[in-house]
Image: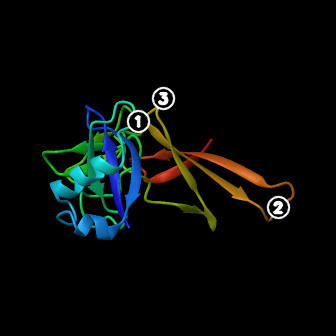
Amino acid sequence: MAHFAELNSSNTVLRVIVVSNDDVNAHGGDQHADAEAFVKTIVPHSTGGVAWKQTSYNHNFRKQYAGAGYTYDAGKNKFIQPEPFSSWSLDSEDNWTAPVTYPSVTVIDSLNVTVTWDEDNLRWIGQTEDITTDPVTVKNYIWDVPATAWNEI
């Protein structure tokens, strides 16, 4: 099955639909403008929709599989994920990166650290849960960039 992303006038993805591979192949094949024009004839645009762009479920082309809220960059011919936080920026491969490098340590005392971004303080925070204790022991941490270590809070 082939997948097509519906774009609005700002090239933001509104939805993704599935179309038969046979229909795509009969209209120019993958990533062909004729296939995109064909989709327009069989699936009406939703409110605000203006175009269809094929996306690859297996990430074989246009960088990654599109989803609602992604943006299609026509100059780069790829779909870009929505910005997760206002402090993040796109790197040279068009992946969103935090202003602080992701922690290199993800295990503390044999426990996996659940890592999340704290946008208000521009830092990584972590949490471990020891389910072998009763009650479960939960510890919270802040990532110390210079020390490359977690500091318990």
Ranked by sequence position, the earlier of labels 2 and 1 is 1
| Foreground label between 3 and 2 | 3
How far apart are the two marked residues, 3 and 1, measured between alpha carbons? Answer: 10 Å
Q: Type of residue at label 2?
A: Thr
Tell me if residue 95 can be seen. no
- Residue drawn at (32%, 62%), measured in percent from left and top? 56
Q: Quadrant of residue 38?
A: bottom left
Circle 3 is placed at which residue position? Answer: 120
As shown in the figure, which amino acid type bears the numbered disc 3?
Answer: Asp
- According to the image, label 1 marks what residue? 85
x 48%, y 29%: residue: 120
Q: Quadrant of the N terminus?
A: bottom left
Q: Which of the pair 50/119 is nearer the observer? A: 50
Count of residue discs: 3
Q: Secondary structure at mark 2?
A: loop
- Residue position for label 2: 133
